[in-house]
Image: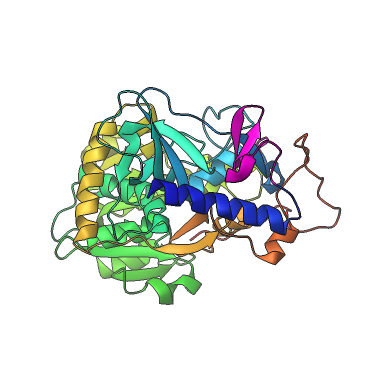
Amino acid sequence: MAKEGVEKAEETEQMIEKEAGKEPAEGGGGDGSHRLGDAQEMRAVVLAGFGGLNKLRLSRKTMPEPQDGELKIRVKACGLNFIDLMVRQGNIDNPPKTPLVPGFECSGIVEALGDSVKGYEIGDRVMAFVNYNAWAEVVCTPVEFVYKIPDDMSFSEAAAFPMNFVTAYVMLFEVANLREGMSVLVHSAGGGVGQAVAQLCSTVPSVTVFGTASTFKHEAIKDSVTHLFDRNADYVQEVKRISAEGVDIVLDCLCGDNTGKGLSLLKPLGTYILYGSSNMVTGETKSFFSFAKSWWQVEKVNPIKLYEENKVIAGFSLLNLLFKQGRAGLIRGVVEKLIGLYNQKKIKPVVDSLWALEEVKEAMQRIHDRGNIGKLILDVEKTPTPLMANDSTETSEAGEEEEDHEGDSENKERMPFIQ
């Protein structure tokens, strides 16, 4: 299976090169591999520096080889998340140095095993968390972050699975202790995490789900939530009109003034969880004004008030839990439970659309504009559409980007709507 997967990827690579009028790199031999000296090359999306879409390019990099305890994966699909947009802007704490390859999750086929790796074989179909570097044809990642995928799960579904469903599961069941008869408010109900939350809530009897989303998404997601509100509506009053006491759990990926609103909606013993801050993203590049405005709107939490009102406030970052706080064992247990639910056909990743690596700018713009319903996927073997290919993300050998043409509004700062 591994050989078949590798050959298919190489055939796709050759086809793309042929269409672009290029010959395989010298030294590649007859197997379609590309070499830089003695090292094989691969295609990868590279972030040259923090900023706008023009900082992304498709480039060739030396293919990694697995170290002790690592697996080498021939990537088939990669997940694109809102955190990737914030990374591109440098809108995160302690951003890594550029240039870098973005991406935190992928699916594919095991191509090689590092020393001391047990439980996996070459040819296994897997999904994995990666501490950056996921948006490439090949990745290497420690075995503790890799999970086998069910036979009937596609690679695109597998790439849409880890971040969204693990985040939703941990928040609902590990942090907030969701139980029968409870109520949940989730923002961005049409996004990947929002849809995962709705599906997981449906596995518990009599759970009421309140969701906010842009109006144009309502028809597509109306069956996944109990009560759906327009993101611009006064959802606090709408929720209280239906449930005067409020809700048991608030899941907030927006931050800003939504923090105070969420806390005000909590019932006694209710839990508010912040797991994102997308309100800080208003334009294509990082905005100090948006950052300051969002934090200025955050209600200052008074511990005495929490004590008096019997409310819980929490935060959740899956990437920090995995890569900084060493909780890979906990996450493996969560993934196993989620795969069990998938096999029982109780949950299923919602894939919005598939994009070629060459189309990463357009894919990122779609998530920036909150236009997706479910997860955006970078399909490593997908050939870009002709329209996208004309606006290629390839750069010169020196890695220089062309400046935006004056008057070109495609890459100007946008004011996106929030789900």
Question: For residue 11, what is the image quadrant?
Answer: bottom right
Measuring from the top left, give residue 417's x and y in whole percent: 56, 61
Report whether 102 appears left or right of 24. Answer: left
Residue at x 35%, y 25% (from the top left corner): 69
Q: Can you name the residue that lies furthest to the front here?
A: 30
- Tell me if residue 227 can be seen: yes
Residue closer to the observer: 58 or 321: 58
Residue closer to the observer: 38 or 365: 38
- Tell me if residue 315 can be seen: no
Residue closer to the observer: 276 or 199: 199
Report whether 240 appears left or right of 89. Answer: left
Residue closer to the observer: 258 or 19: 19
Q: In this picture, is 274 found above or below 234?
A: above
Residue at x 68%, y 48% (from the top left corner): 53
Q: Can you name the residue that lies furthest to the right here?
A: 406
Question: For residue 302, what is the image quadrant?
Answer: top left
Q: Please name the colour scheme applied to the rendered image.
A: rainbow
Measuring from the top left, give residue 326's x and y in whole percent: 31, 26
Measuring from the top left, give residue 196's x and y in whole percent: 33, 57
Residue at x 54%, y 55% (from the top left corner): 381
Magenta-highlighted residues: 24-50
Measuring from the top left, give residue 265's x and y in whole percent: 31, 55
Q: In this picture, is 158 found above or below 222?
A: above
Q: Is residue 198 magenta?
A: no
Q: Can you name the residue that lies furthest to the bottom here?
A: 219
Q: In this picture, is 115 found above or below 304?
A: above
* Count of numbered circles on the image: 0
Report whether 137 appears left or right of 350. Answer: right
Question: For residue 62, what is the image quadrant?
Answer: top right
Report whether 292 appears left or right of 398. Answer: left
